[in-house]
Image (cartoon, helix red, strand yellow):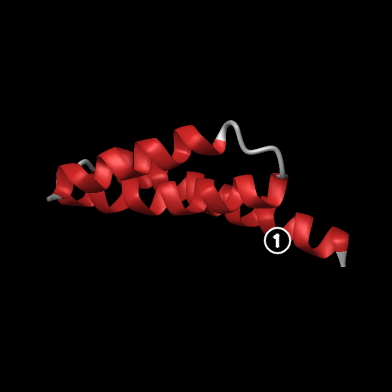
Amino acid sequence: MITLFGIIGLVVVSISIWVKKEKRQDLFFILGGLFLLVHSIGIKSWIFSILQIVFIVSALIEFLKLRRRRN
């Protein structure tokens, strides 16, 4: 079951590379990162968990910046 979270996360992050709109791309990065975070916690890879948290926070900050700029 944990492996499924990893696969979904990898697919979502991979798809996000082809998304043209930055806001939507960041949402895909956040969603894929969350799935990969669940996977990394499930396999007890703490370094990967920390890296995923940094990735998610970075994508979230970028998303919020874009949201503020367009309003």
Q: Position of residue 64 (x, y in %)?
A: 70, 61
Q: Is residue 2 visible?
A: yes
Packing grade of label 1 (10 A; few <14, some 14-19, many >=20) is few
Q: Residue furthest bottom?
A: 71
Describe the element under mark 1 as helix, strand or loop: helix
**Quarter residue 68 falls in:** bottom right
Q: Considering only vertical position in the picture, is 60 above or below 36?
A: below
Q: Considering only vertical position in the picture, is 59 above or below 47?
A: below
Q: On the picture, is 57 further left or further right than 21?
A: left
Please tell me which residue lies in front, 41 or 36.
Answer: 36
Quarter of the picture holding the C terminus: bottom right
Residue ID at (31%, 39%): 48
Q: Position of residue 53 (x, y in %)?
A: 43, 51
Q: On the picture, is 66 further left or further right than 56?
A: right
Residue ID at (42%, 47%): 32
Q: Is residue 44 visible?
A: no
> Type of residue at label 1?
Leu
Q: On the picture, is 51 further left or further right than 65?
A: left
Residue ID at (25%, 48%): 5
Please tell me which residue lies in front, 60 or 2.
Answer: 2
- Identify the residue position indicated by label 1 in the image: 64
